[in-house]
Amino acid sequence: MILEEFEGEFFEAMLANEGSVLYSELKNSQNLNGGEGHRRSIPEENRLLAFYLKDVTVAAKLDVYRSLGEVVLSRIDADDALLAKLNGPMFTYRDAGKYRCPVFTGISFFEIMILEGLHQRIPDHLWLHYFPHFSRKLVSRARDLRPDDQNHEFPTPLCYLLYELVAASRDWIDDGIRLTEGDALVDPEARDGMHILISFEAAQAMGRILEPILCAPQLTQGLKVELLTVAVRMLAELRHYPRLARLESALRESLITPYDTSINARYVSELRRSFGEVDHVLRAKLRNFDRALAEAEDKARGW
């Protein structure tokens, strides 16, 4: 308990100070680790990240994800000054401002940590399922839609952060392709050897990240279509790898039924609306998804 409290206070202090080592090290760890998919390079001089992530079981044992995840959720929920910036104009946020943003910094740490977990084959999802909570919390704090929003890819930094959540989750799935080979069907239950547990967990999380986004009246339809496109393009890519048929199925099911309970009629309707605006060439590659979505629509109508 004492250690958990320390970790929580530590990351709260790190995120509260834009000049802290956490911000600078994450900014310096955005380069890809050549030839290893989306995995980031962690220079030895980045001592904080190296301590937690060079052997990612250290981060797992210290429950870093819980400490950091709760701090990020708290900042989104209670920091009105921060939210005023996140709901303001983009200006230079994408190129520079994000590196001084506690929410982006938290997302970036998760992204790098979970890529390390995937590549190090750790049998732990490292609580990547904080991402749906980040998505829902950000959407709940988004300002109302404005007429000019449709003229911008990302009308606000908050919208860009939603993109980051989807893109990072896509990368965790995508690297599952690089980390598997041969013709044998990859087992989602595997925890030993050349497993990709994190890719399967990320596929499950994807629908839960997108659900509040697609149902949000505060977001432009253009943004919804763009973020859905990121996910379904990954779905189309998985078709080329028969060994990953169960990963493809997991992603498809997650996108249509995010919570494995019952069909959400409103969500399915919004999913159909946005999918209908995805590029027609990409849609043509997703007939299985289209059929599964149609079946979900029928169930939602009680047919």
Image (cartoon, rainbow, N blue to C red):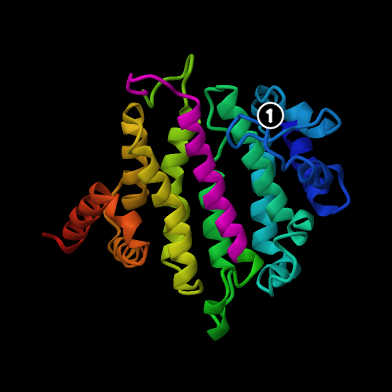
Classify mark 1: helix, strand or loop.
Answer: helix
Query: Farthest residue toward the right?
Result: 19
Q: Is residue 98 left or right of residue 278?
A: right
Is residue 144 visible to the viewer in this orientation of the structure?
no
- Measured as percent of width and height from the top left, residue 199 is found at 47, 34
Q: Residue at x 31, y 38 (%)?
A: 249
Query: Farthest residue toward the left?
Result: 303
- Measured as percent of width and height from the top left, residue 73 is found at 64, 53
Q: Is residue 259 left or right of residue 82?
A: left
Q: Work out which quarter of the rendered image holds the C terminus and state it.
A: bottom left
Q: Is residue 118 left or right of residue 224?
A: right
Against 185, is 299 above or below?
below
Q: Residue at x 70, y 58 (%)?
A: 75
Provide the major secondary structure of the magenta segment: helix
Q: Is residue 214 magenta?
A: no
Against 240, is 303 above or below?
below
- Measured as percent of width and height from the top left, residue 283 is found at 31, 56
Is residue 197 visible to the viewer in this orientation of the structure?
yes
Against 116, is 265 above or below?
below
Q: Is residue 2 left or right of residue 60?
A: right
Against 214, is 199 above or below?
above
Q: Which residue is mark 1?
A: 59
Query: Farthest residue toward the bottom?
Result: 147
- What residue range appears in magenta? 159-186
> Which residue type carries mark 1?
Ala
Residues 119 and 65: in front is 119
Q: Is residue 178 magenta?
A: yes
Q: Residue at x 55, y 40 (%)?
A: 128
- Asked which quadrant contains residue 135, the reply is bottom right
Query: Farthest residue toward the top?
Result: 193
